[in-house]
Amino acid sequence: MPGQLNLIATAPMGLEAVVARELNELGYRDTVVENGRVNFTGDYIDICKCNLWLRTSDRILIKMGEFTAQTFDELFEGTKALPWEDWIPADGEFPVEGRSHKSQLSSVPACQGIVKKAIVEKLKLSYDTEWFEETGPRYVIEIILLNDKALLTLDTTGPALHKRGYRKHATEAPLKETMAAALILLSRWNQNPSRPFYDPCCGSGTLPIEAAMIAWNIAPGLRRTFNSESWPVLPEALWQQVREEAYDAVTDDIPLNITGSDIDPEAIEISIASAKAAGFSKEIKFLQAPAIQIQPQGDYGCLITNPPYGERIGEEKEVRKLIAHLGRLSAELPTWSFFAISPTERFEEIFHRKADKRRKLFNGRIECQYYQYFGPLPPRH
């Protein structure tokens, strides 16, 4: 079995640098950033650690191999040469997913079939059988073809990492937990998490809950399981060790001043239920209130929000009123920082202030800008 593994942390477009920073903070120094992913090396325990701890990545993959594949023969032979038997047991379930872009092998179903056939032929040699029942642990394989280069990966995560396990219900068009965590990490609020935090369009409560998890250093994967937990090559003791270390790392003595509000009473009910499931029923305040009436309290606070996008007829005017109100608040609260992710092109004009920093992000498939207005940091005591 190999000592060092080539691992990939996949990243939503625009968040690759945030994922790389998270990996660096976890102690990985050899990160290489590419579009949509961050490459790094690790051992078996790092599969457990990264699945448990990464807040902004979508999933952790094992890079099985990369080679030129302009023909089905090259794809078959290149796939068969890889050490699948090191990972997949005789009863393993191994579905193949695929994507192809700017490559001669453009039929994704055909490529998936070739990869599956090559892996079966390789496993036949190890397990001396002609038939695989596929009733055991799940090993999702992906073939990505780009410019005639084939990349084969093994997914260690299962359901994507934004599925933390605390959100049983969601409002319409919810913000993903991974994106919410990224917006918070980009805001600098986490440098001093006892400061006030406010989200006036909280929806399902994702931003306030992710803020509380960051403040208390709670590993985002603590409440869920991963496909690779059932893999024989990753002993249960490894997962247990990483989970125990994560529980020991929790800093729940930090006082929290986190508030979320929304005009929709159903959204507030969902937020309260999600906060309770995440263990923050007493720590986060949720209020039913129109965003244009909010008046945050305290100094050196941080307002982070994902305001409505005004996609329905008549809503655009309300969105403009909300953005203008946030602009007025920023003038009234000079020590506060303001952050909003929005596709509204005239955001700065309506806010009446040019952002200190803008970052292009995709909320789902909607291209947005993350408008960042930095207030002063609180004085050091």
Image: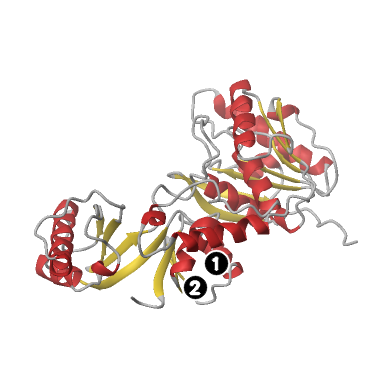
Front position in the image: 214 or 342 = 214
Q: Is residue 52 left or right of residue 183?
A: left
The numbered disc on residue 31 is 2
Disc 2 secondary structure class = loop
Residue 213: % across, % down: 65, 48
Q: Earlier in the sequence, mark 2 or mark 1?
A: 1
Residue 74: % across, % down: 13, 71
Residue 124: % across, % down: 13, 65
Q: Amino acid at mark 1?
A: Leu
Q: Amino acid at mark 2?
A: Thr
The answer, for residue 373, to whether it is visible in the render is no
Going 17% across and 50% down the picture, which residue do you hit? Answer: 133
Front position in the image: 317 or 91 = 91
Q: CA distance from mark 2 to mark 1?
A: 8 Å
The answer, for residue 307, to whether it is visible in the render is yes
Labelled pair 2, 1 in contact (Cβ < 8 Å): yes
Farthest residue to the front: give it. 237
Front position in the image: 311 or 157 = 157
Q: Is residue 336 left or right of residue 309?
A: right
The numbered disc on residue 23 is 1
